[in-house]
Image: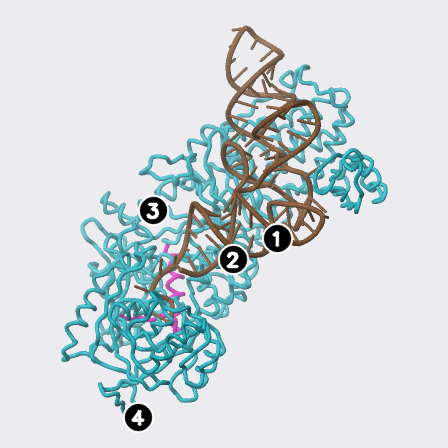
Chain colours: A cyan, B brown
Amino acid sequence: MKEYNPHEIEPRIQKEWAETGIDKIDENSDKPKKYILEMFPYPSGDIHMGHVRNYTIGDVLARYWRMRGYNVLHPMGWDAFGLPAENAAIKHHSHPAKWTYGNIDTQMKSFKRLGLSYDWDRTVLTCKPEYYKWGQWLFEQFWKRGLVVRKKNPVNWCPHCKTVLANEQVIEGRCWRCHSEVEKRDLTQWYFKITDYAQDLLDGLDNLPGWPKRVKQMQENWIGRSEGAEIDFVLCDADGNAPENPTKDDIITVFTTRPDTLFGSTFFVLSPEYKGLDDLIRGTKYEADVEKVVELYKNTTDLEREQGDREKHGAFTGRYVLNPVSGKKVPIWVADYVVAGYGTGAVMGVPCGDQRDFEFARKYDLPIVPIILQKDDKLYDQLKDEQNTVVTSVDWDQAMASEGVLVQSGKYTGMIGGKHSPAVEAIIKDLEAAGKGRKKVEYRLRDWLISRQRYWGNPIPVIYCPHCGAVPVPEEDLPVRLPDDMDLAAGDTLATDEEFVNTTCPVCGRPAKRETDTMDTFTCSSWYFLRYCDPHNDKAPFDPKKAKYWMPVDQYIGGIEHAILHLLYSRFYTRVIHDMGLIDFKEPFTNLLCQGMVKDANGETMSKSKGNVIAPEDMIKGYGADAVRTYILFMAPPDKDLQWDEDGLAGVYKFLNRVWRQVYDLMGQAGEATLFEGARAKVKPEEAKKTLIRERHRVVGKVTHDFKTNSFNTAISAIMELSNAAGAYLRAASADTRDEAFCREIAEVLVKLLSPMAPHMCEELWQTVLGHTDSVHLESWPTWDPEKAQADKISLAVQVNGKVRAHINVAVDAEKDDVAEQARAAVEKSTAGKTIVKTIVVPKRLVNIVVK
RNA sequence: GGGAGCGUGGCGGAAUUGGCAUACGCAGCAGACUUAAAAUCUGCCGCCUUCGGGCUUGUGGGUUCGAGUCCCACCGCUCCUACCA
């Protein structure tokens, strides 16, 4: 018998696979398809354990489904544009491409060393003109569909990365990439109108049963739909006089989810960034105070804004509006607790019903009555006397509950108020009839800011002409290529590259300038899964026929950090491409698995600064790729975080070793190296064989079931159980009492079941020991007979009042009455002197005897 | 503040979805083999016990013949989100 030596086997088998082209995809297959995809990596140095976990899961699934008779698409590529490459280039005085391709090469070698079964001829690199050309083409298609806008807005600016960021890329006020604090700047930028798809993206979540609940929840929160109304308030003078026929300029509109509290609105608040604010205060004595609030707001970072309960700051503008239902004059304030970008940037203050408004009213001594929501009678009685007086001090320290019965609310008094309440419906109806308001749905989702002031990205294919404005680059001129001769360290940018910038207008032919911003890298990753279906197409981003065959992705695997970012953008792109008529589905990923993180033995995340990083390479050097793969799946369910523990890896290595020896032993090739007499078990060979037959069928069923639910950890423990049963049989049966055909069957089943996880070892055993000429990975998955997984006699627990008191052995198909009788006899001792009330027989499980 | 999820031995984790809690593995203990060690193999391994048994899935209650699993309350942890009106 040869020793198990992964370091000799693995590279040799890998070479063999590469030579025979076992992983090449056949597009003309008549088998059903399966598209297994892992989120492609960013080429930042060599791979880490998180990659190993991610790509092992995908590879195991791909190998499994191939054995199940599917035509499997399992591609790999790199998300190759991005800032780290630029930073590295600046540091080393080289070009981002050099760093990027170097890392891709390193990572590809590591992936090959892990034995991942990709068709490397279908690799997609997003930084190649063949790919980014179609990203530009899609940009122009979006443009044609009215989904591209250029607008001036307050935007998130990362001072470290020197570029703007999308809302989704600001995490707790910091840049998602470098964690620098983000600043606000007013800039003109390019946007994709993802908000046009807000409702569709939200609705689509209901059609994704194969997605983790928490990911859907996160997207739902991010889209943030709320129903309410827009209400028009008319400006009036200090005496409450308003123009009879107000024009647009006389009206300020608010958005509220609680129009039912309109009677309780005692003041009005504008965001410091409210667009018409200047016009209201210019030249008045209030201007200075308002300016102070505006300045304070501008100097507050998002990070500061997120600190718990911040103190609110505001100032009176000197202006008033009329409450559209009560006709009362209310003062307009400016306050920093009103967000500019949401709703209309204006809010009606209802201090008795809203905690924020209450706090603001308290601080600036604004009226809190009339109270318009009543929760208990006492509170209302207390306020009754004061109905007609303005009272600024009320006997409580927080706003009243936001739900209850409306009081002091004109004709709505007595109705039930609250979100989605009858009062809301009634007031909206009346406001609509009076032309003073309308039903409105707001979303938290903002348009996707896609321009980046960086070099290493996909150029935005736009030309600015002094006469024609911004025009897209004609399709036949695509791609707009990134210039190669760049010295970023010397300060070169696209904007300083005269040759790149200066061009002619495609419309009028006069001199014009190119856009020098590039697109967010997330635009590259929003459709790469479609490109994999047809990676070499130079006429189109992909052939719709090929996409129809392969898409959607049956199983997508990646980290939870993309729950909103990449997964939302991809759903958006897929919808637009659907609306372009190129595909007939809206959801790109049918099933999604978000794998947990790989942490160190203390449960800490691995990082270079902590010095606790475990290099996959070192683990492979120690135990081989098969052991690392099997272990990372065995340690925990795939969606849970796992703690790396090298002792556990050694344990799995031992297990592989045991299977190795067992297969030799089962095939009668173990020679002297096998068991010694002292290990002979006392079990009879026939008994051990019976058990092993049962285990063989049960375990194949179990593993097959576990693959359906991505429970790789329990699949592996089931294979360990089969190996344990095989070991028991080998110890019980001597060489001359063995059933050779049966032994071979067990060996083949073991090798096949384990082959997705430990592909090299199983390939070696399959060919060398089991004597096959073809690859085990081209074999079909073993079948099983549920009947044979069942023992003919089984042990049942006998409970008395729910407590196990005895065990009985019965035939599987025993009659209920006979089982009950046998059970009662078995627990006579416990039931003596008591009355048996009931006997519950659960077939194949247990018997419960109820006594009094 | 709002939302989601989780809580099982010394550790990682299992439990066919309401039916024998602790599968499988790690660590540990004892033994076989060995001059010895490693490797391998065997057995033990939740807690308490007066050896009859008793207790045990964060805590307390409930539903049920039966609850780790379902319901209610509380405690603790994790993640997401946040002056979003």
Query: In which chain is the residue bearing label 3?
Result: A
Residue located beneath label 3 in the image: A100
Task: Of the two numbered discs 4 and 1 on the same chain, state the one appearing first in sequence.
Answer: 1
Same chain? Circles 1 and 2 = yes
Per the model, the C-alpha gap separating discs 1 and 2 is 22 Å
Q: Tell me which residue sits at (78%, 26%) in the image.
A: A686
Rendered-image quadrant of the N terminus of chain A: top right
Please tell me the numbered disc located at residue A29.
Answer: 1
Amino acid residing under circle 3: Thr
Task: Of the two numbered discs 1 and 2 on the same chain, state the one appearing first in sequence.
Answer: 1
Task: Of the two numbered discs 4 and 3 on the same chain, state the one appearing first in sequence.
Answer: 3
Q: Does the magenta run of residues contain A139?
A: yes
Q: Mark 2 or mark 3, which is nearer to you?
A: 2
What is the secondary structure assignment of the residue under circle 2?
Answer: loop
Q: Residues within 10 Å of mark 1 (few under 14, many from 20)?
A: few
Please tell me the numbered disc located at residue A245.
Answer: 4
**What range of the chain is rendered magenta?**
A128-152
Per the model, the C-alpha gap separating discs 4 and 3 is 64 Å
Q: How many marks overall?
A: 4
Q: Tell me which residue sits at (54%, 46%) in the image.
A: A24
